[in-house]
Amino acid sequence: MLMQAQWHKLDRDRTVAMIDNVKSSGDHILFSLATSEAKCAKLSFYRSLLLYRLTNYSSLPSFSFDYLGDGKTYVHLDGSPTAIYAANDSGNLALSAETVLDYIVFFFSHVSGPDGDVYVIEDPSNHPVLGALNYMQMDDIVARHEAPEITPDHAGGFTVKTSLYYLGSLVRATITVDAAGRVDVTDSQMLLSIGVDLAEHGVSA
Amino acid sequence: MTTQNQPQNQPLSKLQGFFSKPDSALPAPGAMNVEKYRQLLERALSSVPTGQRLLRFAAQQRITTHVIPGKGTSGYLPENRAVYVVLPAGLSTVLPMDILELGAYLRQAELQILGAKNPDESMTSEQFTVAFDAKIIDSIAVMCKMATEFDEKGQSEFIDALITSGHSELYEAYRNYGQGEELVDVYYRLIEKTA
């Protein structure tokens, strides 16, 4: 079962410190104490790094940036794999058969595909991004979905077969994750084309 | 809806190897830089009357548009008088939905300046809900209006973008009845369905 992020709100002092820190790293002045909230969550596959989220509630919809950090320094997760790979290379990654699927979900939550967002579907009946589909579409997805399969290799990495939702299609993908956390989609097979791009658009009902 | 078995489907095959390339963090050939992206968005928006009007208002009121590499939603921040547009990594073209959303955020800025403020913590719960829903419905309506204007110029991909991103019922309500009660009814019906 995938880990659900348990968010903890940062207190005022830690929020101020975080906003000051990311301000100085060049992220414009997107967040202020008056309109923003900071929270953090433990990730099962990192030893000492936490996922931080700064949200500015004055925009519609609310405007959030995610960071990986240790409470002193924060790296903005900018949609490319670079920040995640750098965090992995700092010795914080602790992959196991129990955590690798969480890692893949986290990875695709923060890294865009070449033509859009990639969603890992562990349980299609309980996946928020599929909520916009109608009952017939959901029935088709549930019928074709297969549970993830995780196979360790001899070098500390894993091969994971799982369902993905990408560009309006349900896909069965084979994904390798090496010991350093590098992700590679080595095979993908379209199972079903729905034609609804569920990418997170800012203005939505 | 179709069922297919095409392992070499072009968009899917682009996933293979994409995340493991040594240069995957670098802009692909033709990929955007922030300034080019902003210019392309504004140029496209200015090609329809509503977009042109909103850009003119933004210029008069010194509402700025900033592009930031990232993943997630864009938005208008009233305290900064600025629209922030998130530029996903590896994007090589402007997408119709991003153009419509820029128009919606400029419209939010316009409403803010005209006195219809974004919901904030000073409001009661009821005031907050009313302000929130009114702004979202207005944003959807202005996106539908611009998509219709693009369609009248022969660019139907903007309506397609609204439909494929889940706004088909709202667009239908706008097309049939304009920005009136029907659009509001559909909005609340969708909210209830997803609640």
Image (spheres, rainbow, N blue to C red):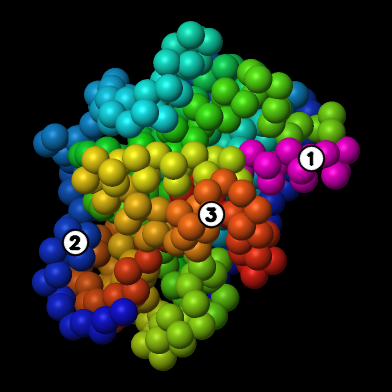
Q: Position of residue B96 (x, y in %)?
A: 31, 44
- Looking at the rendered structure, whether the residues under marks 1 and 3 are on a common chain is answered as yes
Q: Quadrant of residue B32?
A: top left
Which chain does the numbered disc 1 sit on? B
Circles 1 and 2, Cβ within 8 Å, touching? The answer is no
Q: Earlier in the sequence, mark 1 or mark 3?
A: 1
Q: Can you identify the residue that label 3 sits on?
A: B177
Q: Earlier in the sequence, mark 1 or mark 2?
A: 2
Taking the view exactly as shown, the residue that stands out farthest to the front is B177
Q: Position of residue B183 (x, y in %)?
A: 59, 54
Taking the spot 65% from the left edge, 20% from the top edge, the residue there is B114
Q: Position of residue A94 (x, y in %)?
A: 47, 58
Tell me the element at label 2. helix
Indicate yes or no whether the magenta region holds residue B130. yes
User: Label 1 crowding class (10 Å Cα cut-off): few <14, some 14-19, many 20+?
Assistant: some
Amino acid type, mark 2: Pro
Amino acid type, mark 3: Tyr
Taking the spot 36% from the left edge, 70% from the top edge, the residue there is A164
Residue B186, placed above or below residue A164: above
Q: Can you identify the residue that label 2 sits on?
A: B11
Indicate yes or no whether the magenta region holds residue B75. no
> Magenta segment range?
B124-136
Residue B176, placed above or below residue B110: below
Tell me the element at label 3. helix
Which chain does the numbered disc 2 sit on? B
Q: Can you identify the residue that label 1 sits on?
A: B128
Q: Earlier in the sequence, mark 2 or mark 3?
A: 2
